[in-house]
Image (tube, helix red, strand yellow):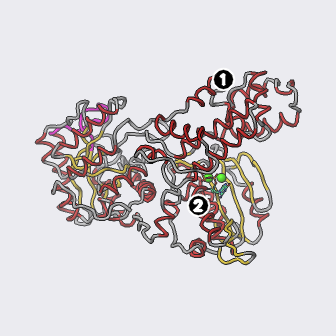
Amino acid sequence: MPVHNADIAAAFSEIADLLEIQGANAFRVRAYRNAARTVNEYGRDLASLIGHGEALPKLPGIGVDLTAKIEEIARTGHSAFLDGLHKSWPPAVTALLRIPGLGPKRVRILYENLQVRTLADLDAAVRGGRLRQLPGFGPRTEENIRRVLAAHLTKAERFSLAVAGDYAQALIIYLGALPGVERAIVAGSFRRRRETVGDLDILVTASAGASIIERFAAYDEVKEVLSRGTTRASVRLRCGLQVDLRVVAQESYGAALHYFTGSKAHSIALRRLAQARGLKINEYGVFRGRVRVAGETEESVYAALGLPYIPPELRENRGEIEAARAGVLPRLVERAELRGDLHSHTMASDGHDSLEDMARAAHTQGLSYLAITDHSPYLAVTHGLDPRRLAKQGAAIDAWNAAHPEITLLKGIEVDILEDGSLDLPDAALRSLDIVVAAVHSHFNFSRARQTERILRALDHPSVRILAHPTGRLIGAREPYDVDMARIIRKARERGCHLELNAQPDRLDLADVYCQMARSEGVLVSIDSDAHATRDFRHLDLGIGQARRGWLEPRNVLNTRNLSELKALLRGGRAEPVPGGAR
Ligand code: DGT
Ligand code: CA
Ligand code: CA
């Protein structure tokens, strides 16, 4: 694993925390904290500098000892000193420091007197009434800790974008209909289309804040009001999802929306840029001295900093500000630009609807072609198609196409990649199809080398055109399998294959960073619903969000092509090189 500056900074912060708990000299603690900040903010990747044999730059406040530690972490991914600290203070202890009211002194007392090492231990100690017996822990402290813990322990879980979306949509309709409300919009990670969200952040513009807050707290789904003021409130819904609401004046809409959309890293980088221009930026606007120079729209906020509008999906401080400054922001792909879908199932395997119903639904969704890719026989539960049933389905597809010029069905298969990288159907059956999508559904635990070789072999099969859900992850349920994605992407380019971005809510596989990698290697991404029922085509929206987070433009996406361009790409073996793939 490559070591990033952030990893080195995290190690230094943790050393500072643990030294503090130990009661170490305050100057020493501060030196580590400052070093963490310096490393984190340093513009170039220290590990790659070291990897290229370059001398480390002279960093402020970083002497011989810290330089040696940076080199050690960059080379090995570890700090022997930190590992030593962990022997007496397990890593989980540092989480206790984040609880308001618990400084290093108290954490140390908890650890030594009550053997508290984790938040769960602390929770047990509070419940057992053991906290108040300790020196320096009054009833007030105990009550504070109890409250923070309750919020912490239930908040740990993140919600999938799709689930959060259902709640968000209902809330926006409810809030939007309240008297006095001008606009209601979801900001935060939801607007940035992250695959999971910690909570929903809703922004409302209205003249009278207090009455909006009242009605928000009275929303039917609200289980508990966590905090409430005149312009803001936080609630927890019955499902456990937290929702933060902010009411702002119309004139601050853009600035507030920008602030609450984040990400925090993007906002911080932007604030630094503003400072360099003598401007101040906050949730109320952009200011020169006391004069407000922008804030009503997000466009005005960016324009005040001399930047074009940056779409929310890019706001992660992953190079988007530099790209904006250089005038080379990508023109991100949009849902309306998808002309087709290259992965779908019918009742023939494990889908719920007929081929004809799937075709009609896809057409209703604005698509002009749909690949029918039922399973191959390997996994018995999917009731996959053998060559005989596949041929029968092919005849049904021919019949459909003859009668329905409005949407073309492609004959396809989602063929299993077997243990050794061979495919689950005879070559002749695969050759008879318009499109072969290959997928791993077994042996997830192979070593990286073995898994990579297996997939590379499948991509070498002359019929294979798309690698489905390339890392096999199920968000929150199954880790991606261990593969060398860089090699897979290079192989795909060499073979004229494409990578799927599977838009099922719990897959969203390809992840954003791999989309970026595919883009820079000139490999096309196919944004597919993997629909198992007519209603599943709506998942394409989620796929688009992930693709946009991965900087994909229409030209980087296979299924923005019209049918004849697509057929050429599927036939041709080699994809046309995409010029200027890298940003
Ligand atoms: P999440 O909820 O964990 O999925 O992620 P976010 O990004 O929605 O984070 P959240 O809900 O804590 O905050 C929403 C936005 O509010 C965040 O993206 C940026 C802004 N924000 C929150 N705290 C701060 C802060 O301390 N500084 C700045 N600049 N912005 C903040
Ligand atoms: Ca949030
Ligand atoms: Ca929030």
| 391 displayed left or right of 469 | left
Looking at the image, residue 579 lies above or below residue 540: below
Residue 511 circle label = none
The answer to which image quadrant residue 175 occupies is bottom right
Q: Measuring from the top left, give residue 544's x and y in whole percent.
A: 42, 58
What amino acid type should be assigned to the residue bearing mark 2?
Ala
State the separation of the CA atoms marked 2 and 1.
37 Å
Q: Measuring from the top left, give residue 505's x and y in whole percent.
A: 45, 48
User: Which residue is depicted at the point 35% across and 65% down?
Assistant: 554
SS at mark 2? helix
Q: Nearer the viewer, residue 109 or 384?
A: 109
Q: Which residue in the protein does label 2 denote?
A: 269
User: Which residue is depicted at the point 51% across and 36% down?
Assistant: 72
Q: Which residue in the protein does label 1 denote?
A: 88
Q: Is any atom of residue 356 visible in this view?
A: yes
SS at mark 1? helix
Q: Measuring from the top left, give residue 253's x and y in whole percent.
A: 66, 70
Reply yes or no: does residue 325 show up in magenta. Answer: no
Q: Measuring from the top left, give residue 427's x and y in whole percent.
A: 13, 40
| 147 displayed left or right of 438 | right
Task: Please report the bounds of the magenta region as a residue range.
Answer: 374-387
User: Which residue is depicted at the point 48% across and 42% down?
Assistant: 3
Q: On the rendered image, what quadrant is the N terminus found in?
A: top left
What amino acid type should be assigned to the residue bearing mark 1?
Ser
Q: Nearer the viewer, residue 163 or 24?
A: 24
**Along the polypeptide, which appears first: circle 2 or circle 1?**
1
